[in-house]
Every structure is written in structure tokens, then in C-alpha cells.
Amino acid sequence: MKFFISIDLEGCAGVVGMMHGTLDDSKNYTFACEQAVMEANAAARALFDCGAEEVVICDGHGDGTNLDYRKLDPRCKILMGTPMRERFCILQNDFDGMLLMGYHGMEGSPSVLAHSFNSRANQYIKVNGKMVGEIDIDAIVAGSRGVPVIFVSSDDVTVSEARQILPYIRYVETKQSLGHNYILSKNPQSVLDEIYTEVKKAANEASKMAPYLVEGPYQVEIRFTRAEDAEHAVKHLGFSLLDSHTVARQMDDLGTYF
């Protein structure tokens, strides 16, 4: 068996960020990186205990250079850095499942630290007229390559967002969102045991979980905070301008853009 773990930071236990800034600006960032390593390791250990022969951990936050890689389970391979040639470029149908860990809710949701890829630039992203966040898009990318998402860990709002499109997944709620920078968190240590238990179940059920299939081509609409970002998307990325801040284009593969 072969599994792919994409680990972000905002949805990990005990992570809340700061007012008027991003998580990366806050005192909480260092803790978030350390907690992400422990949560990824708990999942990796469960996968190996279920017979996995290969586990890839993708450093999925920001520029892809956040984790202390010396502290990751030494049996894992690590996908890191930026820019990607395409999203999760090594993720193909030889993987038995994908895990989305530490993710956050889409921009506009009541999830802690909610945003859609870029908290400073993007007001929203729509695919085929539906408002989406990173969980939707990554599930579509994985599904287009024949890989099911089998597990999600994040706050309660983000888990609910995931289960709307992936009702069969195993999951762990790491905390309760009470505001953009305010949470009621589970103890970060106790979450590790929950992740281990639920990921073992997910690995054993992976063969019964179907990839999330949304047929292309995809009509993508993005509304930016600043008009110059919309202009850049028109001039350099093949989008059409809908208004001063909003652009749209048709895509055959979401992975090549996101």
C-alpha cells in the first residue's frame, strides 16, 4: 500500500494565529510547525502499522518549507518547496489514498484562520459556480488522478466542509472554531492518539472509498482583493476580466493552476 499525506498548519490542534496578520506572522507559528510534525507522524505510524510500503508527506503550507524534516518518521519521503510544476505532481493512481491534515476552511467560512490559498489576495474561488476552498480543490485534483481522500483532520467547521463532499471519510476534529483567531482546542497530545486510531481505520477501509470525481472542464472564477491581481491574471494566466476584481477561465486540469 502507498499513501500521500498533505499537511497544512492552520487546522492542527492548538493553532490559532493572531489578529491582523497571518499565522506565519504570529508567535503561534513555531508551535504550529512542531504540532504538524507530530500529527503527520501519528498518521504515518498508523499507515505503516497497517502495512503501507510507502508514505509521502507533503509540506503543504505557504512556500513548502515549514517542518523540521529531521523529526519526521524516517520511513517517509518528503515533498517540499515551491513553486510546484503542478499541484501534488507525484500523486498518481498508484497511491491507495490521500490524507488532508491540518487544513482550514474556505474563505468566508467561520473556520479558524479561514482562507482560500492566499489570505491576502483571494476573496473567493468558485469552480463550476460553487464556492470552494482547498479541500474541494485538492479532492478534485486527487480524484482526477484516481486517488480517494480517506482522512481529514482539522477544526469542526472544516471537517463539516469536507464531509459535505466526502461523507465516507474518517476524520478527527482537532478543535472547535469560535472565531477567526479564537478556538476551543483539544489537548495537542490527545489528538495524536485520535489521529492514529482513525487513520488505521481509514487505511483498512481505503479500498472501499471512491475518488471524488468532478468531470472537467472546470469553469473557475476568482475574486481578488486588489484590482492589479486581477489584471495580472488576465495578462499572464489566460483569465478573462468579469469586473475590476473578478476573473474567470475554463480549465481542463485544476492541478496545473492551483
Image: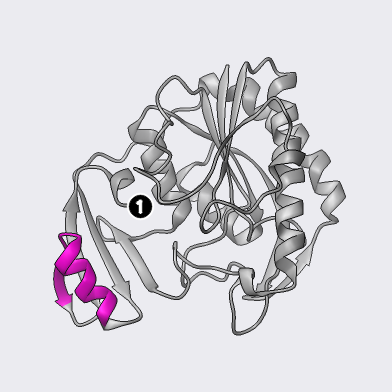
Find out whether residue 235 is within the magenta segment. Answer: yes
Taking depth in this image into account, of 148 and 53 the one nearest to the observer is 53
In the rendered image of this protein, does residue 126 appear above or below residue 102? below
Q: Which residues are magenta?
A: 228-242
Quadrant into which the N terminus falls: top right
Q: Quadrant of residue 232?
A: bottom left
Q: Secondary structure at mark 1?
A: loop
Q: Residues within 10 Å of mark 1 (few under 14, many from 20)?
A: some
Taking depth in this image into account, of 28 and 132 the one nearest to the observer is 28
Taking depth in this image into account, of 150 and 88 the one nearest to the observer is 88
Q: Quadrant of residue 192?
A: top right
In the rendered image of this protein, does residue 49 appear above or below residue 41? above
- Give coordinates of residue 75: x percent, y percent: 69, 24
Q: Amino acid at mark 1?
A: Phe
In the rendered image of this protein, does residue 49 appear above or below residue 57? above
Residue 78 can be seen in this image: yes
**Relative side of 190 to 38, left or right:** right
Find out whether residue 157 is within the magenta segment. Answer: no
In the rendered image of this protein, does residue 192 appear above or below residue 197? below
Q: Which residue is mark 1?
A: 258
Majority SS type along the magenta span: helix
- Give coordinates of residue 31: x percent, y percent: 77, 61
Residue 15 can be seen in this image: no
Residue drawn 69% across and 31% down? 44
- Give coordinates of residue 99: x percent, y percent: 57, 38
